[in-house]
């Protein structure tokens, strides 16, 4: 199947097709790492994982990992985003953490990031 993807080059037709293709995603992530930095590739991989989750609890757990590894100021793979966006995201996560630890009716929006 991967050979078919490589041979027909269909993953090169658009970004959405590229992201749906295993080989297309792999090439894109390698390109981003080599051209820009590891942080953006890791962040995009994390976003894909976040959007694949089917429950709010799963989305919350992945979101918490993303914030800790990519958004917090001292994160290992801090992405370069504006101060306002960083503060907004951290504020949303803080509210979600309060709900997660105090109540059972957690709703994590798919557009959190």
Image (cartoon, grey):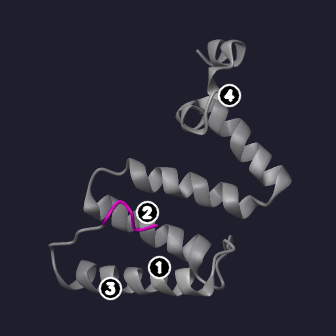
Between disc 1 and disc 4, whose residue precedes? 4
Is 16 situated above or below 72? above
Q: Residue 103 at x, y = what percent?
A: 16, 80
Q: CA distance from mark 1 to mark 4?
A: 32 Å
How many badges with numbers are in the image? 4
Between disc 4 and disc 3, whose residue precedes? 4
Residue contact between numbered discs 1 and 4, judged by CB atoms under 8 Å: no
Between disc 2 and disc 1, whose residue precedes? 2
Q: Is residue 30 left or right of residue 14?
A: right
The residue under label 2 is 62
| Mark drawn on residue 89 | 1
Foreground tag (3 vs 1): 1
Asked which secondary structure carries label 2, the reply is: helix
Between disc 2 and disc 3, whose residue precedes? 2
Determine crowd level at label 3: few under 14, some 14-19, many 20+ residues with C-alpha closer than 10 A: few
| Mark drawn on residue 95 | 3
Q: Residue 20 at x, y = what percent?
A: 52, 34
Name the residue located 57 percent from the left edge and 30 percent from the top edge. 21
Name the residue located 38 percent from the left edge and 86 percent from the top edge. 94
Residue 25 lies in the magenta stretch: no
Asked which secondary structure carries label 3, the reply is: helix
Q: Quadrant of residue 44?
A: bottom right
The residue under label 4 is 12
Residue contact between numbered discs 2 and 1, judged by CB atoms under 8 Å: no
Is 48 situated above or below 43? above
Foreground tag (2 vs 3): 3
Name the residue located 20 percent from the left edge and 85 percent from the top edge. 102
């Amino acid at each position: 199947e991967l050979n078919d993807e490589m041979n027909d080059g269909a993953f090169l037709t658009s970004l959405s097709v590229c992201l749906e293709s295993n080989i297309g995603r792999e090439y894109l992530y390698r390109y981003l790492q080599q051209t820009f930095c590891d942080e953006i590739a890791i962040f995009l991989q994390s976003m894909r994982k976040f959007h694949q989750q089917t429950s709010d609890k799963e989305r919350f757990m992945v979101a918490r990992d993303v914030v800790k590894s990519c958004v917090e100021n001292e994160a290992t793979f801090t992405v370069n985003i504006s101060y306002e966006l960083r503060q907004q995201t951290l504020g949303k996560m803080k509210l979600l953490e309060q709900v997660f630890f105090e109540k059972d009716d957690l709703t994590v929006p798919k557009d959190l990031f």
